Amino acid sequence: MSNKFNEEKFIYTPAPKEKDAIPFWWCFPSTYQIGMASLGYLSLFRISDQNKDVYPERIFTNTEKTTHKISVVELAGFSFSFELDFLSIFKILEKYNIPFKASDRTEGYPLIFGGGPVLTANPEPYAEFFDFIITGEGEEIIPELVTAYKKIRHLSKKEKLIYLAQISGIYVPSLYNIEYHPDNTIKSFTPDIPEAQETVTRRCIMDLSKCIYSPILTEKSVFPNMFLIETARGCPKRCRFCLASYLSLPARYPDLEGILNAIDTGLEYSNKIGLLGALITEHPHFEKICEYLLAKRQEKEFEISVSSLRIDKITPLIVKMLVEGGQRNTTIAIEAGSEQLRKFINKNLSNEDILNGIKIARENGLTGLKVYGIIGLPSETEADITELINLMKEIKKENKGLKLTLSISSFVPKAHTPLQWDKREKNKTLQDKLNYLQKELNKAGILFKPTSLKWDYIQAVLSRGDRRLAPLLEKVYEYSGTLGSWGRAYKELTEEEKLDIPELDWYALREIPYDEILPWDFIDTGLNRKTLEKEREKAYK
């Protein structure tokens, strides 16, 4: 790992450290190669590294040697972006002999905390493993956390947590008590002490005028030396199933000048520019960004890539920028094949929008297109699946020579979205739909990449899970985290150890009534339950 660090290019200057700077581990639940492609993770590291009172270190699953010994580390933060990240988090904790559960960690261990979209949406399945959890956007709260911790670093663990629990956006799970009804639903979720907040507010940075870009570059990243620039945060479209949209409201955009300056900075260090955002084409000056990139390519050859495009926002200029920048393939998300089902999920795209956008893309040089869709959405019928097949056939017919792929996932109800109450379909029903798609698309010569329904099911369990799943997660890790380990672990815990864990179908496959307390109800994301209920009712009208 030391060789990898020697090959890095820093775009910023770390602050000289005070003698008593806080030894701080920033942990990423994957390899160095993947972690160094995470703009959010690296941005938080930069914020810490430019603070003279913090001595941060990056830790990955394949870190071989550390600067700080675990015995001196005071804070260890984990990025948590996907439900199954817990497996890699356990791997790091185990590697450094850190007990998984917060209740088992005595004064000699660092405070373990986590943050990211999974923990902001529903931290409860993982609550017992963290001393505290950050809800919301890290750059808004990390400086405040460091300032607070400096005042309390010599207090006891319990005193530290009580102090931190009073900071907006910080959730300390050990300070809350949960009771359950005999039917497995939550009876009450209450703070144990006055200092703990009844409602934990998601922190959100409102001033996004300053553009976030890659602070460190390396050839060892999965995107070698790619200079990433955030051009949009959040999405204003509010597709009713989409966590990325509802958890990142309001949609915000960096100033145009900041983005152009970031491009200039990036080209000093790299010949690869990547634009990131949930919906980058929504930036009010996106075409000016494209024009600027094309103009800069007259001065220097460099690659340009984007995460994905909104098909009804595609213009000849945008495609020209991509093609000249070396990207001849792109991804679009249509979610559903029928206009009726797209309307249900608030994806306001007509078939005409889709076909026109793809025509523009092909005519201006794109040669490959991945279309992303979802099966098992609430209210979906067999006719919707047939319409998806027909739409893909029409796309192929009208765009000869275009390499076309349909990538399909299955619906997973997500916390804090209007469809959080809806049930997931059984895997057998979903598999029948996948088989039908596979058969018909094969006939049409369209490449088909289906999801893993079994892993999607596990994701649904965790997405709507609660603290009773904690022993299951530990046991699954003990059994190597494979698909088969979930059934084996559940059977052992409930039949042999007699633990009271609801059936996994109870979490994933049932429609939840509005009057039921949800595990994540205590988190205020800025949209209340009534707003989400009304949005769901609009879908079913």
Image (tube, rainbow, N blue to C red):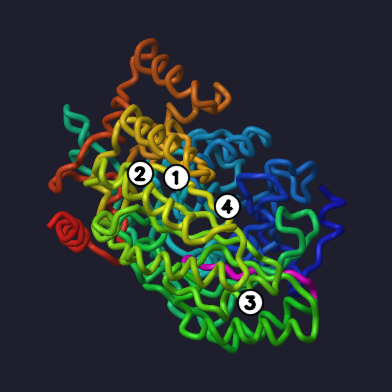
Q: Which of marks 1 and 3 is nearer the N terminus?
A: 3
Residue under numbered circle 1 = 408
- Residue 69 or 83: which is nearer the viewer? 83
The residue where tag 4 is placed is 77
Q: Which of marks 4 and 3 is in front?
A: 3
Mark 4 in CB contact with mark 3 (< 8 angstroms) = no
Labelled pair 1, 2 in contact (Cβ < 8 Å): yes
> What's drawn in magenta, residue-wise?
269-278
Q: Is mark 1 on a helix, strand or loop?
A: strand
Q: Which of marks 2 and 4 is in front?
A: 2
Among the two numbered marks 4 and 3 on one chain, the one whose residue lies closer to the N terminus: 4
Q: Residues within 10 Å of mark 4 (few under 14, many from 20)?
A: many
> Residue at the top extreme?
496
Label located before the other in sequence (1 or 2): 2
Please state which amino acid type lies under the numbered disc 1. Answer: Ile
SS at circle 3: helix
Percent coordinates x, y for residue 5 in the rendering: 82, 56
- The residue carrying pointer 3 sits among few (fewer than 14), some (14 to 19) or many (20 or more) residues within 10 Å by Cα, namely many
